[in-house]
């Protein structure tokens, strides 16, 4: 059955909280666009990179936003991803409309001249992007504007500037999540092989060791293998002849790397063990 022909699920069966969208975590954006001789600034918490080469970004704007009526005719905009010390500015820019107030009058706003578009960008963020509009997508309520990045502006010391994070409220970025374990996926390959993929903490340089852990408590080493250029493991390993006689069951692929906890992946009948 295709997605288009699947029956819809009544909303009464799966209640959706009206503020479920606040579970999203994103970097707060500040969008600038021209309104005649004036410059409009607004907050866009739904700001994303959506393509790498060429680099495209998207901002999603609600129905009450004056900015969404300005970007189309302008054909361009700038997007600044806020730094953590711009929370007050982000709140200000999202609380008022250019229809009523000139938000560039605030002492919190520092505008810088763009190189390739006509609208200035807000200084002080993690990065500021000059964008030419490439696509406009209408959703049931919101509207997405997709722009190609034609110029970018980074702070002098990019690593010292941390993003302003939106998750319901606005937050500073916390401690970096540290990897301590190997993570593994595996499946039976053709002609008596097993395909293994593994990641591990980025700083490790030791080879990966692959072992089959058998249902009876025994194990069969499959060898040591170097990481690829990304620091990961992706390999297809021939299985020893002894494996052919094993019964289906709780067989696991164990991958070890010095400096991290071992990782395991199940090989069962459902995942292709025969």
Image: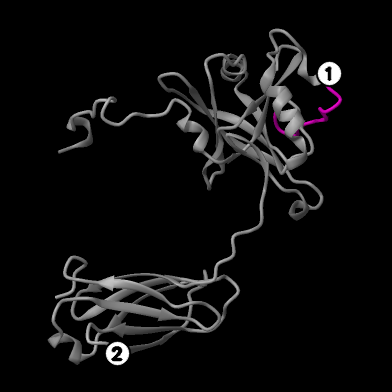
User: Callout 2: helix, strand or loop?
Assistant: strand
The residue at which mark 2 appears reads as 220
- Counting from the top left corner in percent of width and height, residue 31 is at 66, 27
Where residue 20 appears, as percent x and y from the top left, is 46, 32
Cα–Cα gap, marks 2 and 1 = 71 Å
Magenta span main SS: loop
Q: Which residues are magenta?
A: 106-117
Judge whether 182 appears above or below 101 on screen: below
Would you name the residue on which mark 1 appears? 105
Near-viewer residue (167 or 55): 167
Q: Measuring 80% from the left and 30% from the top, which residue is drawn there?
A: 113
* Residue 5 position by quadrant: top left
| In this picture, residue 86 sits left or right of residue 12 | right
> Viewed as shown, does residue 31 lie left or right of 240?
right
Q: Residue at x 29, y 77 (%)?
A: 252
Q: What crowding class fits label 1: few (fewer than 14 Cα within 10 Å), some (14-19), or many (20 or more)?
A: few
Q: In the rendered image, is residue 101 in sight? A: yes
Q: Quadrant of residue 88?
A: top right
Front position in the image: 54 or 192: 192
- Closest to the camera, between mark 2 and mark 1, is 2
Residue 194 lies in quadrant: bottom left
Q: How many marks?
A: 2
Q: Kindly state the secondary structure of the residue where label 1 is placed.
A: helix
User: Picture coordinates of residue 60 (x, y %)?
Assistant: 53, 27
**Residue at (15, 77) in percent of width and height:** 248
Residue 245 in the image: above or below residue 36? below
- Dot label at residue 268: none
Q: Residue at point 72% right, 44% down? A: 126
Q: Quick one: label 2 or label 1, which is nearer the N terminus?
A: 1
Q: Is residue 183 magenta?
A: no
């Amino acid at each position: 059955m295709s997605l288009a022909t699947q029956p819809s699920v009544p909303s009464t069966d799966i209640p959706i909280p009206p503020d479920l969208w606040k579970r999203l975590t994103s970097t707060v954006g500040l969008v600038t666009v021209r309104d005649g001789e004036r410059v409009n600034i607004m907050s866009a918490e739904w700001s994303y990179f959506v393509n790498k080469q060429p680099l495209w970004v998207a901002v999603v704007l609600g129905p009450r936003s004056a900015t969404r009526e300005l970007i189309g005719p302008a054909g361009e905009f700038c997007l600044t991803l806020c730094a953590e010390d711009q929370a007050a500015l982000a709140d200000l820019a999202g609380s008022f409309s250019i229809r009523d107030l000139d938000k560039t009058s605030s002492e919190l706003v520092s505008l810088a001249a763009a190189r390739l578009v006509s609208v200035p960008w807000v200084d002080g963020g993690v990065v500021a992007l000059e964008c030419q509009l490439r696509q406009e997508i209408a959703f049931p309520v919101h509207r997405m504007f997709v722009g190609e990045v034609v110029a970018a502006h980074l702070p002098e010391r990019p690593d010292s500037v941390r993003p302003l994070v939106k998750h319901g409220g606005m937050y500073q970025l916390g401690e970096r999540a540290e990897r301590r374990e190997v993570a593994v996926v595996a499946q039976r390959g053709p002609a008596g092989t097993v395909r293994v993929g593994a990641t591990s903490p980025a700083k490790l340089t030791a080879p990966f060791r692959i072992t089959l852990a058998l249902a009876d408590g025994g194990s069969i080493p499959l060898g040591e293998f170097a990481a690829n250029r990304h620091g990961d493991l992706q390999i297809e390993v021939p299985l020893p002849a002894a494996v052919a006689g094993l019964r289906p069951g709780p067989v696991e692929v164990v991958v070890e790397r010095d400096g991290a906890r071992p990782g395991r992946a199940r090989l069962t009948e459902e995942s292709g063990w025969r």
